[in-house]
Image: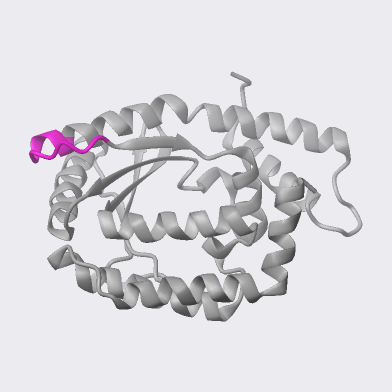
Amino acid sequence: MTPFGSLDNVSRAGEILRRAQLTQEHTPDQGQVRRARAVVEGYRSAHAAPLQAANMGLRSCLATEGFETRPSQRLKRMPAIEAKLQRLTWLDLSIMQDIGGCRAVLATQEQVYQVEKRFRRNSYRRNGQHDTIRNYVDEPRSSGYRAIHIHTEYHDRRIEVQLRTRDQDLWAKFVEGLTSTTGVDFKNGAGPNEIHTQLREMAVMLSSAESYHLYPDDIVDVLTKLVTIAVADPTIRSRYRMIREGT
């Protein structure tokens, strides 16, 4: 693992990578970018052991509450880190919350809140401070995204824990798949407004159906509209063709 030095080094390296993506004067040279990436790779790698500890902590909470769900985990990839730095120009890399992240998917919202409560209680015992909670269930993102995000710390590293219901996970994976297939970053707001309108409508439908584990017939209409818009949009067709051709 490449040592990253201090958090100040991490902040500077993140800023270099952000500036490297801009087409203006005083952009970093290749040597600076290479050294910055080495620092960021080292910092990213330093989240591996804390992430594993967070995953085990989440797994313990799930087991104690009687749920057999196995959480997943991932380290944020370098292209995703650089893209986030470019997208959020105010963000200091040293305080990025989701370089290490783990997730549990549960059957109902009630189960999500059970696990959240236990995890937060355990975190307070461990860290002596309260975790930060982002409740995207009570206040969904403008995209329609719903979940509970817990920002916690393990071994002095920031880790994000996501708790979703199956329906919320279905919606999120659908959007990720749409992004992957078309090459248009719908996940972060790119693409035609018509598609985002349909995605928000789909999120509302899934949320209302969740208590009954049923999907209204209107979901089919929403999916049909999404496909129709995506196929008709020239920008999406162009991006999809580029992906298929590897250009």
Query: In the rendered image, which quarter contains the N terminus?
Result: top right
From the viewer's side, name the closer residue of 139 and 212.
212
Q: Position of residue 73 (x, y in %)?
A: 39, 35
From the viewer's side, name the closer residue of 125 and 44.
44
In the depicted structure, whether residue 53 falls above or below residue 11: above
Residue 124: which quarter of the image?
top left
Q: Position of residue 79 (x, y in %)?
A: 65, 43
From the viewer's side, name the closer residue of 33 and 237.
237
Residue 126: which quarter of the image?
top left
In the depicted structure, whether residue 95 falls above or below residue 58: below
For image coordinates 31% across by 32% down, the residue present is 55
The colour scheme used here is one colour
- Per the rendered image, the range of residues in magenta is 61-70
- Is 197 placed left or right of 88 in the picture? left
For image coordinates 19% across by 53% down, the residue present is 112
- Is 227 placed left or right of 183 in the picture? left
Residue 84 visible from this viewpoint: yes
In the depicted structure, whether residue 185 falls above or below residue 48: below
- The rendered magenta stretch, by its main secondary structure, is classed as loop
The answer to whether residue 9 is magenta is no
- Is 75 placed left or right of 184 in the picture? left
For image coordinates 35% across by 56% down, the residue present is 170
Q: Position of residue 191 (x, y in %)?
A: 62, 71
Residue 160: which quarter of the image?
top left
The answer to whether residue 68 is magenta is yes
The residue at the far right in this view is: 25
For the image, the number of numbered tags is: 0
Residue 142 visible from this viewpoint: no
